[in-house]
Amino acid sequence: MSCCVKTHPLAPERCGATKREVEEILFAAKVAAELARNDLPEWKQDCIETYVQCKEDHWTGSCYDCFRSCEGQQGEWPRDKCRRRGGGG
């Protein structure tokens, strides 16, 4: 689905995706591009790396919303809202 969404970002219904799914797919592509940059502040790199772990390991909570919170707090991941399954942080 992600390839379809990247090809048709303004028409997610063509891919069977909701608007929220489209936002997350496009955001993941943006995160990958940012990780390749050398000039990101360390706190933002930490937020991105934690977001990637959250998505890959299927943590509880919305990884996207928690990343946005982490950005707003400049590096403080909201572990009360997004964490590894089983309660680990």
Image (cartoon, grey):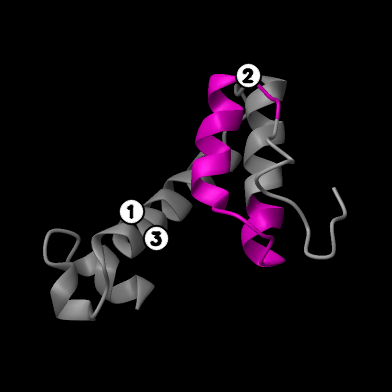
Residue 8 found in image quarter: bottom left
Q: Is residue 21 left or right of residue 60?
A: left
Indicate the position of residue 18 as horizontal and vertical percent values.
26, 68
Is 59 part of what is drawn in magenta?
yes
Q: Secondary structure at mark 3?
A: helix
Write the residue at 55% across / 31% down.
69
Label 2 crowd bin: few (<14), some (14–19), many (20+), radius 10 Å: some
Q: Is residue 36 visible?
A: no
Q: Is residue 4 left or right of residue 8?
A: right
Q: Secondary structure at mark 2?
A: loop
Magenta residues span 52-76
Q: Is residue 74 left or right of residue 25?
A: right
User: Which amino acid type is shown beneath numbered disc 2?
Assistant: Gln
Q: Which residue is mark 2?
A: 74
Q: Which residue is mark 1?
A: 23
Q: Are marks 2 and 3 in contact (CB under 8 Å)?
A: no
Indicate the position of residue 45 as horizontal and vertical percent values.
67, 32
* Between discs 2 and 1, the one toward the N terminus: 1
Indicate the position of residue 32 as horizontal and vertical percent values.
53, 49
Q: Nearer the viewer, residue 49 or 37?
A: 49
Q: Which residue is mark 3?
A: 25
